[in-house]
Amino acid sequence: MKITKIPSRRPETIIRKKVAAYARVSTASDAQLHSLGAQIDFYKKQIMSRPDWEFAGVFIDDGVTGTKSKREGLDELLTACRDGKIDLIITKSISRFARNTVNLLNIVRDLKESKIAVYFEREKINTLNAEGELLLTLLASFAQEESRSASNNMKWSIRKGYAEGSLKQVRRCYGYLVELGEVTIVPEEAKVVKEVFERYELGELPSSIAKDLNRRKIYTFQGAKWSVNRLNVLTANIFYTGNTLLQKLFVPNHLDKKQIKNRGELPQYFIENSHEPIISMELFEAVREVKAKRTYKKRPDTKHAFSGKLICGVCGANLNRKYDRGNHKWQCRTYRKSGVAACPSKQVPENTLEVSAAEALGLPSFDEMNFLEKIDEVIVHNGNKLIFRFKDGSKKDIYWEDRSRSESWTKEMRAAAGRKTKERYGN
């Protein structure tokens, strides 16, 4: 029996990849543009010479740098990728494609999700293979370090400006125009600012003032209507007295960029006579006193002067009052709710807070009214440290000592312990 193999005559189907190239030069000089033209010719010939590749174009940017976010050629390339017109991108090097590792990482990851590879010729890296995975890992690390370094440089520059009394970081506020640290009064708005302070001093309620301003079609510089909260913020801003308190906010984490209130973690800078005032310091203090008295009158008898004033220096939560074996103590809300794992803060006896407050205010004993009028908040840090933040922007650190066990016992506690001892031994 004879068997003859008949070879397949059906031509093999070649699945061709749609390949595009990206080229860029950073200046528009004749020499550079000649180089760009050479790159275009080179890539066109290279792509068209391969039977398994389909020419999808050469996308170019001339006279721009890799650090610039607006590059029309690259944008057109990415649009074509999203439209399914490209399977592979070839480019000379990582630096030609992008010099900002954050942007590069984002682009490469987006393309990878669509199964689109980028091949960097100089580095010989294809982003869809194993080397590409390593590249992404390295780029992620570089991107985070670059972001941290840039953030630290920015923080250093800003804080240096604060220490030198620069107002470049001061934001526009109603009544003033602030441009590159130059502060100028806006006359029409300044009249309203002064009117608001004077009406506060006379005892008019902020709800009434806000209603009147809105009726007169006088709005904030953003065009928003006035509210009680907006007026309270305005009348608490010492900037209107011609003085400036710097570094009231800061960004602790360079990744999420979230600003938080500076509660003593960083130094603040109070600059006197930094710009032309709209109101006098006397009027500002008078309004502060009116607001403090109004707050005191509204406070229920069951609410203590420390309520809402004590801030945990560990997690930033408020401290709550509790009664424990004859003594009142103040304890972090987070600690009380979730335990030491959530916040390893320390509780503070109420009488310790009162003695420390009196010392901070320069008084022989604790005065509740004085405390409410002058103290904005108290930061309770571990290490027995209390930071008293005054409403004028100043602060004072007070350290307290733990009482011995015998000193902390009240008469009631001693009596209760005596009764338990008698019950235990039957006497």
Image (cartoon, helix red, strand yellow):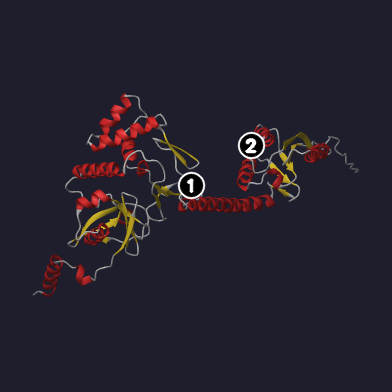
- Disc 1 marks which residue? 257
SS class of the residue under badge 1?
loop
Instruction: Pick the quarter of the image with the C terminus.
Output: bottom left
Q: Position of residue 174 (x, y in %)?
A: 39, 35
Q: Position of residue 144 (x, y in %)?
A: 57, 52
Residue positioned 64% across, 34% down in the render: 82
**Residue that numbered label 2 is attached to:** 70
Inspect the image, locate mark 2, and give the three-letter code of the amino acid beneath it.
Lys
Residue at the limit of the structure toward the right, as seen here: 2
Between 223 and 11, the one lying in front of the other is 223
Could you tell me residue 370's position as x and y percent? 22, 52
Q: Dot 2: within a 10 Å radius of its alpha carbon, few (fewer than 14), some, or many (20 or more) residues?
A: few
Q: What amino acid is at disc 1?
A: Lys
- Local secondary structure at mark 2: loop
Residue drawn at the location 23% of the way across and 42% of the way down: 290
Return the disc, 1 or 2, that comes first in the chain's sequence.
2
- Crowd class of label 1 (few under 14; some 14 to 19; many from 20; radius 10 Å): few
Residue 330, position as x, y percentages in the image: 26, 57
Please say whether residue 50 is visible from this viewpoint.
no
